[in-house]
Image (tube, grey):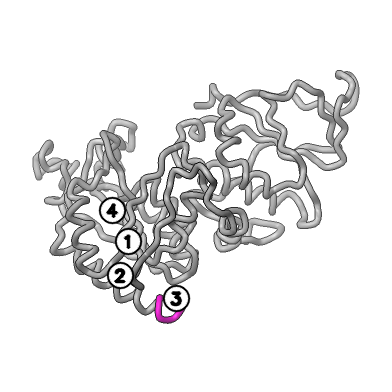
Amino acid sequence: MTAQINNFTLTSGPPGPPCMVQHNAPALLFSPSGRLCTRNFFHAFNDGLIPLFITVHTIFPDDQDRVLVISGSCDWWARKYMDLLQSFSKHRIITLGNDTATHCFPSATVGLVGHGFMAIQSNLMANPKTLMNFHALLEKTYGQKRYPRNSHFTPIVFSKPRPRLALASRSGGIGRVISNQAELRQVAEEEGFEVIELEPKFETSLSETYKLVNPSHVMVGVHGAALTHLLFLLRPGSVVIQVVPLGLQWTSEVCFGKPAKEMGLEYMEYEIGVEESSLVEKYERDNLVIKDPMALQKKQWSTEIMNIYLKEQNVKLDMVRFRKYLKTAYEKAKKFMEKEG
């Protein structure tokens, strides 16, 4: 991944080519390369947008502007997230791959500051912020936008005042697919939910996805990038149910469990049983893969081991057991609706 990141040499004063564009504001230069180029929605936020938010509020005072300078081989990344990127600066964003002019700045900050998986640690920031502040930025950027004329999504009209459940879907051979998702949807509807399935295409704009997720009272999904959309939920008190496959307890907690709780969401965790994992069809029950995933991972958390749990494993929910979680979520959502609407 690091081979995709461009190297730069910073100079102060001459020698150098004459300035073609002179800026009064300092530059913030970063490269959306590496994992960001995989088009993975989780990495877009975890490795790019949240660190950008942290860096801006760590390096620059509130009243100081900055110019974003983006380098890298992923021009599509800047285009897709342009609305949000532009909220960090009043100046035009410079993408070096498309700009051949020589720009001069009074100073420059290179690279982004991160605080861990989906984390913003206010005690490490000169201008303390939290995930709630980041959500407020998302709301400011996308919350007031109308659907574009050529929208891929048709706005959903809910005919009855029922709690809305956003079902984060996974499909294809990517792993961690809920094989009985149709049954899950049916049971959720039986419990009283209005269900929308969330599986936006890459070309779907964030404003469209935001409009789909934002009004939902409950989000349900197996551990994966789609749960990053919990950042879009409108108000504290919304419910998130994360389905945790075998061997992914720690990852599920740090990537989505902890952030959900920090945002004031009602977080519920459904840890699947052995019989609900497709791995039992491939491995014996006394194999460490099944018997003790944590012990196996402590020995060696290699790409091979990681792929067993992330890519080889699918989930078939025990709907008798999972229905109880849906009932609890429904009760929470109804109370939430009575209080907040």
> Distance between the Cα atoms at labels 4 and 1?
9 Å
Q: Residue 341, which numbered label?
A: 3
Q: Residue at x 58, y 24 (%)?
A: 73
Mark toward the start of the polypeptide (2 vs 4): 4
Does residue 149 lie above or below 261 as drawn? above
Residue type highlighted by circle 4: Val
Q: Residue at x 41, y 55 (%)?
A: 256
Residue type highlighted by circle 2: Ala
> Distance between the Cα atoms at labels 2 and 4?
17 Å
Secondary structure beneath dot 1 equals strand
Give the residues drawn in magenta, as a range: 337-341
> Which quarter of the image is occupied by the C terminus?
bottom left
Q: Residue 241, which numbered label?
A: 1
Find disc 2 in the rendering and name its residue. 329
Residue type highlighted by circle 3: Gly
Which of the two discs, 4 and 1, sits closer to the camera?
1
Q: Residue at x 20, y 69 (%)?
A: 324
Q: Quadrant of residue 38?
A: top left
Mark toward the start of the polypeptide (4 vs 3): 4
Find disc 4 in the rendering and name its residue. 244
| Dot 1 crowding, Cα within 10 Å, few <14, some 14–19, many 20+ | many
Secondary structure beneath dot 4 equals strand
Which of the two discs, 1 and 3, sits closer to the camera?
3
Secondary structure beneath dot 3 equals loop
Mark toward the start of the polypeptide (2 vs 1): 1
**In the rendered picture of this protein, how many numbered marks are placed on residues?**
4
| Dot 3 crowding, Cα within 10 Å, few <14, some 14–19, many 20+ | few
> Distance between the Cα atoms at labels 1 and 3?
21 Å
